[in-house]
Amino acid sequence: MTGTAITGTGVVLPGIGDPAGLLRGAVAGAGPVCPAELIGKKGLRFKDRATQLGLCAADAALRDAGLLGPHGLRVPGGRVGVVVSSNLGNADTVCRAVETIARETTAALSAMDTPNASSNIIASETAIRFVLRGPNLSVCNGVTSGLDALRWARLTLRSGRADHMLVIGVEPDNEITRRLAGGPVVDGGAAVVVSRTDAEGSTDAVGGAAPRLLLGPVVRTAELRDAAARLTAAAPDGGGGLWLCPDPALVPSGAETAGLTDWGECSGALGLLQCAAAVGWADAGRTGPVHALLGGAGAEATATVFRPAVRPVLPAEAPAEAPDEAPATPPAGPLTRHAPHPALPVEEPA
Amino acid sequence: MSYAITGVGAVASIGDDPGQIFDALCEGRSGLGPLRGFDRERFTARQLFEIEDRSGGDGTDEPGRATRFLLEAVRQAAADAGLPEDLGGIPVLVGTGLRELRSLELWWRDGVPFAAGDLDFGPALRRRFGAYDTHTFAGACSASLYALALGWDLLEQGESDTVVVAGCDTVTESMFGLADRVQFDPPDVVRPFDRARRGTILGEGAAAVVLRREPVADRPVRGWLRSVAVNCDAHHQTAPDAAGVRASVERAQAAAGSRPEDIDLVVLHATGTPLNDRTEAEVMAGVFGGARPAFTGIKSLTGHTSGSAGLMSLIVALASVAGGRVPPIAHLTDPLPEGEGLRLVRGAPLTTPVRVAQINGFGFGGVNAVAIVAGAA
């Protein structure tokens, strides 16, 4: 059976551009993300903020996976698809348009806003910019959207519709999204590239990209606690490793956690920030599984487990101790060993 | 491989269920009417294909109507398939162009109560059907056929035995207004594939089907899904690309194991816009060559129902497969030159055996989805 793996990631947050930074937490005093500085001004005009942020995350993830080079895509574009997770993406275009119509008439609208009235604008602009002709999906599914997007990417890879799926999660911060969310919104996000491997558990991905984490099944349950129970029951080691869970009470004792709560309301971006955090964990040499869960109180939940891909290690490079016990570069910051009340951080922030 | 379609449901401006909609199409009854939910004075275009369900007077709107249409279509399809009242863990995949953005507009402009969580349809499907494996996809005008492709994959990959796939949309004032901004001479009617076509007019509606890996004993099968192909032009935000459209059609036919001459009916996307119809006609002429399927389309009478349009067309195709009757393309009198070789159904319904039908859905952003359905073997 076809396996699937994360082969690249990109993080777009104020002052943070890599998964290791994500695990360290917010950067004090960092200004808003400037897309033109990250990917150049060309092609950004008339794009809404969410689309610009999405293009930045996409660019970084495709490069990280080795799929995008100086002369464009290195694999056939027909075999690369896009899934975008965003709930609030075009809320500003929509609300400002009705405001303008009420104040004047449609003559006062800008025709350049027309494509942005459709909620699939981020995914279609991403396809156009990078010439990705595979399946093009926009998931707007509430708090679970990010991990739902991962589920659909995994499914379309397994069914053979694509070899690589670029999965993006972004949300913009503006007056309208703030009022909707009841507070500041992340104004950024993350992306991952998910690729087919030739067999379940294999570390050979199609197109030469190197798997960083292998994807497990994505589970959907009626409540968050059911999802946590499913992951714990399925874990051979009883649920150790890293847990990324909106309800700390559901994290098994002994597991490590990272809150990812420093950036305001993340909504559709949160699942992709979890994926990027998992890459940061694996890149730091950690080998334990990463459990990612999303869901609101009393509402449906989506969850999955990532397992860091074990790369062949030459004898000369073999670490003296198992990496999980003593990581070569421990991820500093808000990673905490979870213990029942009160939570005691075992690693002090750097 | 093919999967059984065991239930169908739909609502549109021309009918409250699939049977009424099919009859209206055959009889040439249109759902076009004056704007009801928007202030007419602010727009150049003043017609839409709206469903008459609002409690207030003209020019006043109410939130939650896309959700209402969706719930009714899903209710019909689930009942038709004999599914339990509580859908529980059965996946419900909803393709939509505009989600509940109309409610968002009313919230922002008029202060109508609205929660961000109700932008998607999950909470409403949970309340009404107990469904928790619910998914809202924003996929412009091919959204419901795109959702159908994912439903197919869930069955094929063994993740589920039963899937509900739906599409729904109301018209948002932002989308209508932005289109109005650039449409200086709005069309009086929608004329798909006609030389005199001058653009599309949006409509409201919802459609749903129940897909099963295996048919259920003693329950009718409404048709068989043979394939759904999806891709993206990666070419332009609003204009179609013939190469991308053609690739999606050829892939759907290959996946279904159908040659062009095996297909008896094509339900076109056919929006009545100059460029879209020309591109679709060129691709159809190229793909079908000497094969002579009947071609029809529904949007001259339903309007362009956006996210629900693809599944609405599919349900019409199933009715043609079942009854051997194909509704005509209303308001088509003088076919566009690119479609001159195509057997376009016009004037009156065509009586003909339909064993295999193809359904086209092409959306904003170049998102293409094509499905192939068949009757009992």
Image (cartoon, grey):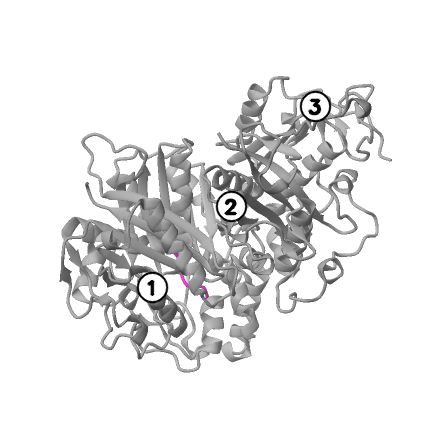
In the rendered structure, which amino acid carries the disc numbered 3? Answer: Ala
Residue A39 percent across, percent down from the top left: 71, 59
Callout 3: chain: A
Q: In the rendered image, is residue B67 in sight?
A: no
Compared with B210, A183 (above or below) is below
Of residues A307 and B75, the one drawn nearer to the viewer in this rendering = A307
Residue displayed at 81% across by 19% down: A321
SS majority, magenta: loop
Give the residues in magenta: B168-172
B194 in magenta: no
10 Å crowding of disc 1: few (<14), some (14-19), many (20+): few
Q: CA distance from mark 1 to mark 3?
A: 60 Å
Q: CA distance from mark 2 to mark 1?
A: 38 Å
Circle 3 residue = A255
Residue B318 percent across, percent down from the top left: 23, 50
Secondary element type, mark 2: loop
Residue displayed at 65% across by 65% down: A44
Callout 2: chain: A
Residue sticking out furthest to the right: A350
Secondary element type, mark 3: loop
Residue displayed at 54% across by 28% down: A200
Residue A59 percent across, percent down from the top left: 67, 53
Comparing labels 2 and 1, the label whose residue is closer to the camera: 1
Residue B173 percent across, percent down from the top left: 46, 67
User: Could you tell whether B3 is left or right of B62 in the image?
Assistant: left
Of residues B50 and A294, the one drawn nearer to the viewer in this rendering = A294
B171 in magenta: yes
Residue displayed at 41% across by 39% down: B153
Circle 1 residue = B286
